[in-house]
Image: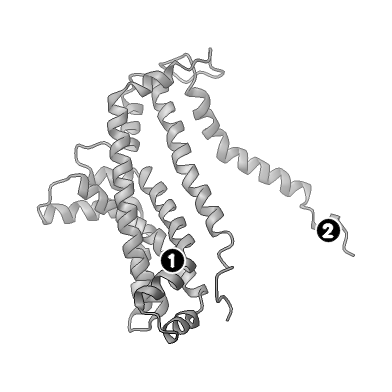
Amino acid sequence: MRSNKSTRAPLGLKIAATCGLLFLHLPILLIFVYAFTTEDKSYQWPPPGLTVKWLAVTWNRPDVWEALGLSVRVAAISTGVAVVLGTLCAAAVARTKFFGRETVSLLVILPIALPGIITGIALRSAFNLADIPFSFWTIVLGHATFCVVVVYNNAVARFRRTSGSLIEASMDLGANGFQTLRHVVLPNIGTALLAGGMLAFALSFDEVIVTTFTAGQQSTLPIWMLEELVRPRQRPVTNVVAMVVVLVTFLPILGAYYLTRDGDKVAGHGK
């Protein structure tokens, strides 16, 4: 029997991991602290006092609600577009063979690999050439470019782990295309699509760079936060909003993790 000591991480590795986690998450914890500070003009440490009044102030700021509503609508529609297009593209790439398949796969993934500023400049140039005015829909189009990639990556991985013999068996047993989709395909890829949609929503909700080039005079919540940091009126309000953004984006990511952690256990896997 092997000793448990052989499976334990060295002390140095534990210390390094702890330092890395603190480096990543302490700044986020500071956001939560400064959301309750009594000082409204600067970031003092330690805070001179703590108060919950900024929660009520933020609740009563109409500009916050307007920016939040815009971000939620954009993220929801961008995610819907991404789920449809990403799933169809993943099905084509994973289930069929055609000339240029790998090139298509690369082109689908490319928007998320490129720097956001490149994508933003490209979209802005395209909208100007097509004489398309900046609006809600230009933001949606901009966000959909990278949301599709997230859904595609999840869906194509699940398609490749799902045995094609399940679909063949369904058709041999007399099921039509819709019945096969409903009872065989969707149950096997459903969690991957939901996880991809959650990640896409989180990415869209807090996107800044592409939005800057496609929003015109509109302000999503991240753009509103950036403007408030440059010209602050009530600095803790920005931290309250940031705290909400952290929670809103954390929950979909956590949900996506739990939905996909057992992704290899799909029907027909390995058959």
Q: Give the residue at mark 1.
A: 155
Name the residue at the left extreme. Answer: 131
Rendered location of residue 247, percent (x, y): 48, 37
Q: How many marks?
A: 2
Q: Tell me the tag on residue 52.
A: none
Q: Which amino acid lies under the numbered mark 1 shown in the image of this protein? A: Ala
Q: Nearer the viewer, residue 183 or 198?
A: 183
Quadrant where the C terminus is found in the figure: bottom right
Q: Which amino acid lies under the numbered mark 2 shown in the image of this protein? A: Ser
Q: Of helix, strand and loop, which one carries label 2?
A: helix
Asked which quadrant contains residue 94, the reply is bottom left
Q: Is residue 157 above or below residue 38?
A: below
Q: Give the residue at mark 2.
A: 6
Whole-Å distance between the Cαs marked 1 and 2? 38 Å
Question: Is residue 228 in view?
Answer: yes
Q: Residue at x 38, y 83 (%)?
A: 97
Q: Is residue 188 left or right of residue 93?
A: right
Quadrant where the N terminus is found in the figure: bottom right
Q: Residue at x 56, y 53 (%)?
A: 258
Question: Is residue 118 in view?
Answer: no
Badge 1: how crowded within 10 Å, few (<14), some, or many (20+)? Answer: many
Q: Of helix, strand and loop, which one carries label 1?
A: helix
Name the residue at the right extreme. Answer: 1
Badge 2: how crowded within 10 Å, few (<14), some, or many (20+)? Answer: few
Q: Is residue 57 left or right of residue 217?
A: right
Rendered location of residue 117, percent (x, y): 31, 50
Mark whose residue sits in front, 1 or 2: 1
